[in-house]
Image (cartoon, grey):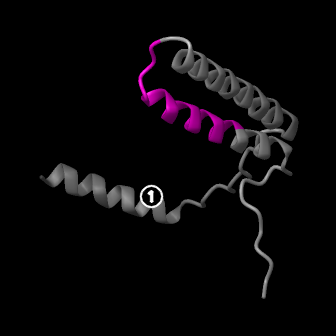
Amino acid sequence: MAKNADKRAKQGARTGSELEPAQKPARTVPTWLRRIGCFLGALFCAFGVLYAVMVFLVGKGSPIFIVAIVVFGAMALHLIRAGLGDGRWRAERPER
């Protein structure tokens, strides 16, 4: 017990006397790379919609494919809008 108490006391004294290092700015993804990623993701979701429609209509697909169509379609639209945006995920609301 005495060893642990001594270690804690030394750590507390050491951390209080040290200067905190300067914080680095957060790294961001370049806009061109984010746009490429968004459009590739939207293309993948579009193929998911096409595949789900084909399986549902041509094959013997279950009604869960309707959910897949809606989800993949919504995600594709979201990714296209995010890729066309200015890099912010949320739009600023105007002040009243």
Q: Which residue is drawn at 21% across and 51% down?
A: 4
Question: Mark 1 Cα within 10 Å, few/some/many (few <14, many 20+)?
Answer: few
* 72 in magenta: yes
Q: In this view, does 40 lie above or below 87?
A: above
Query: Please, what is the dominant secondary structure of the magenta stretch?
Result: helix
Of 11 and 91, nearer the camera is: 91
The amino acid on which the numbered mark 1 sits, given as a three-letter code, is Arg
Of 21 and 3, nearer the camera is: 21
Q: Which residue is drawn at 49% across and 27% down?
A: 65
**Residue 68, percent from left and from top:** 52, 31
* 74 in magenta: yes
Of 81 and 67, nearer the camera is: 67
Q: Which residue is drawn at 19% across and 49% down?
A: 3
Horizontally, residue 2 falls left or right of residue 30, namely left
* Residue furthest to the left: 1
Q: Is residue 38 above or below residue 57?
A: below
Find residue 29 and report its image quarter: top right
Horizontally, residue 38 falls left or right of residue 61, namely right
Q: Which residue corresponds to mark 1?
A: 14
**Residue 87, percent from left and from top:** 81, 49
Find residue 48 and report its image quarter: top right
Query: What secondary structure is found at the residue carrying circle 1?
Result: helix
Horizontally, residue 14 falls left or right of residue 90, namely left
Q: Which residue is drawn at 45% across and 18% down?
A: 61
* Residue furthest to the top: 59
| Residue range (magenta) | 60-76
**Residue 28, percent from left and from top:** 76, 44
